[in-house]
Image (tube, coloured by chain):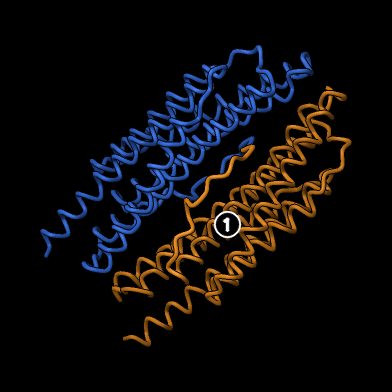
Chain colours: A blue, B orange
Amino acid sequence: MERQISAELKQLKSQLLAMGGLVEEALQEATRLVLQRDSYDLTRLESVEQKINQEHLQIDEACLDVLARHSPVAADLRLVMAIIKINTDLERMGDQAMNIGYNTEHLTRDGGVSVNLDLPRMSELVREMVRKSLDAFMRGDAELAKQVLASDDAVDELKNQAIRKLVPHMQREPTQIAAALDLILIARNLERMGDHATNIAEDVIFVTTGVDVRHKATLPSNG
Amino acid sequence: MERQISAELKQLKSQLLAMGGLVEEALQEATRLVLQRDSYDLTRLESVEQKINQEHLQIDEACLDVLARHSPVAADLRLVMAIIKINTDLERMGDQAMNIGYNTEHLTRDGGVSVNLDLPRMSELVREMVRKSLDAFMRGDAELAKQVLASDDAVDELKNQAIRKLVPHMQREPTQIAAALDLILIARNLERMGDHATNIAEDVIFVTTGVDVRHKATLPSNG
């Protein structure tokens, strides 16, 4: 019985890792859409997001099933709870990637903005956060999870920089206001994806060290 | 043993309802800050948000404890899972209310906007959504939960109206661009609070009917 639950937990962790891969794919595709917005086509992003949604439901059901059949306690129970929470965060990251797709639709409609933002850097940072938070989860590595919390500050700062750059631009080029707003919302969705990765990292720290780093500090945000 | 778990689940539901009350309080206080922004003071909002965070950790621990001691199955297990998820959504609504507080700080710094938005209506709708979703949870009333999904569309539409009103205003009054952006972010945070109430309603529908309404339709948003 003990070995049976171990095998099932291992399987659940692999599923979660695969879901993380889908989220990375959605993020990459959303970023590609923003950068090559003139030929945007949401089909591929929609299909990845649907896969994420299906995985979300399946992992959720599998967790319930493990709880019902094995009644895990202590570390195993905390692990299943962490999987349930991480699964929810990953699913919402899929929603955010999809929102970036819709924002790009608006950006194209609104005519674009003649300002360069470092969105590729922001997107890459968020992607690293997703990967590191899940790697940290797989390995039970709290130190790696802590690196994710540091990257979150960097992503927030990039979003704030974007706003500081776009507001004066809107003042100089009033015809680009709607499009600049779309771009701010894109930066904000990327930042929110980073927030979800941070939630995952916090869960990893909790599950590996038993220390709850949630609610230790509430930092002001532009959000 | 059976009666013991029933008593504990009842207690957990009451705690969750109390947490919902705190979220309503945070929402009201955040809305008051926006409407009377010239004399804003975040102290009260911060104190409510801290209470929400404490409740969040306590409810989470209590759920783990119930799972570990009673190993619930079937309906009881689904109920505990729903409590864990609803608890997370309520905690994030507290974060959003706090964000509205920070946005108000920026709005004041940026000098305000001479446009009237129906933020009181938007806030009231979201408040009703929180209350109805939790009432629906307490009573196991899927029909009431479905009303929350309908209100979510109304809130989204109010946020879109706000953007449609503010973008031309930014074009006419470039000095108010930064402040108008703060106001858009406030509307957006209110909308996100509505999204969390919607997540709660979906969990209620799932736990009461066994029908999963999550991921049935992905609607475009300005988000």
x, y percent for residue B181:
73, 32
x, y percent for residue B200:
53, 60
Q: Can residue A201 be seen in this view?
A: no
Between B134 and A217, which is closer to the camera in this rendering?
B134
* Corner quadrant of residue B108: top right
The amino acid sitting under disc 1 is Thr
B59 up-or-down from A40: above or below: below
What residue is drawn where x is 52% and y is 75%? B140
What residue is drawn where x is 81% and y is 36%? B165
x, y percent for residue A141:
27, 40
Crowding near the residue tagged with mark 1, few <14, some 14–19, many ≥20 C-alpha atoms within 10 Å:
many
What residue is drawn where x is 52% and y is 20%? A119
B130 up-or-down from A39: above or below: below
Residue B157 left/right relative to B202: right
What residue is drawn where x is 71% and y is 48%? B42
Q: In which quarter of the image is the N terminus of chain A?
A: bottom left
Q: Mark 1 points at which residue?
A: B198
Q: Is mark 1 on a helix, strand or loop?
A: helix
